[in-house]
Image: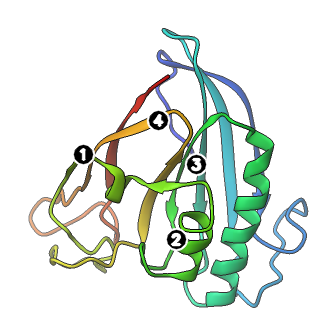
Amino acid sequence: MAIFYADERLELLEYDHYWLSDTPDVVGSKTWGNGVVRMTTWARFRERESGEQLVLVNTHFDHQVEEARVKSAELMAERDKRFGRRRVVMTGDFNCASGTSAAWKALVTDGPYQDSWFSAAERGESIDTFHGWKAPRAGDRRIDWILHRGALEAISSKVCTYGRDERWPSDHFPVLSELRLVD
């Protein structure tokens, strides 16, 4: 799960990966009935200008097995403890709806995270993020999320529906959020 970042703005301090399974440190492991190997990548950065640190986490949950999604969320919430009180931004294709799914509830309702879609002061039009190469459609089935915790404030959040000539760069529309470091 790639994490792209602006090298001129952020200094990479450390990073690692783990697999969404009962054996997360075993490369390529899968144990919850999912047919596809799923994983998480995390990276800790220092903002060059302020010296402040934050952790970025990126993941991709299983698309078929609900139990795998819930256990993935529980594993991530447990592994999240290693970051202490640091600011954390978690992004991913969670393959289940924000606000209602058991995986979302494990990370947000029962966990330490806020969903930037709901916490942002300004929000764009509600669009389903999975579109299967079709035109945008209004809806609240957002399976791609940006979560945050710690001293971060969500300024805005929106679904980007960019395409050209009815072609899109992915079968998902990305969620874009502007977050601000706060004290």
* Residue 149 screen position, x and y as percent: 55, 45
Give the residue drawn at x 55%, y 54%.
113
Secondary structure, mark 2, is loop
The type of residue carrying mark 2 is Phe
Dot 4, how many residues are within 10 Å of its Cα: few (below 14), some (14-19), or many (20+)? some
Most extreme residue toward the left, as rendered?
Answer: 165
Q: How many labels does the image show?
A: 4
Secondary structure, mark 3, is loop
Give the residue drawn at x 81%, y 68%.
28
Q: Nearer the viewer, mark 1 or mark 2?
A: 1
Secondary structure, mark 1, is loop
Give the residue drawn at x 52%, y 21%.
7
Q: Label for residue 2?
A: 3
Q: How far apart are marks 1 and 2 (CA)?
A: 23 Å
The type of residue carrying mark 3 is Ala
Q: Label for residue 94?
A: 2
Q: In the rendered image of this protein, does residue 14 appear above or below residue 106?
A: above
Which circle's residue, 4 or 1, is located before the other in the chain? Answer: 1
Which circle's residue, 1 or 2, is located before the other in the chain? Answer: 2
Circles 3, 4 touching at the beta carbon (< 8 Å): no
Q: Distance between the residues labelled 4 and 1?
A: 13 Å
The type of residue carrying mark 1 is Ala
Q: Nearer the viewer, mark 3 or mark 2?
A: 2
Tell me: 8 left or right of 14.
left
Dot 2, how many residues are within 10 Å of its Cα: few (below 14), some (14-19), or many (20+)? many
Q: Label for residue 26?
A: none
Q: How far apart are marks 3 and 4 (CA)?
A: 22 Å
Q: In the rendered image of this protein, does residue 80 appear above or below residue 53?
A: below
| Location of mark 4 (residue) | 152
Q: Distance between the residues labelled 3 and 2?
A: 15 Å
Q: Distance between the residues labelled 2 and 4?
A: 21 Å
Circles 2, 4 touching at the beta carbon (< 8 Å): no
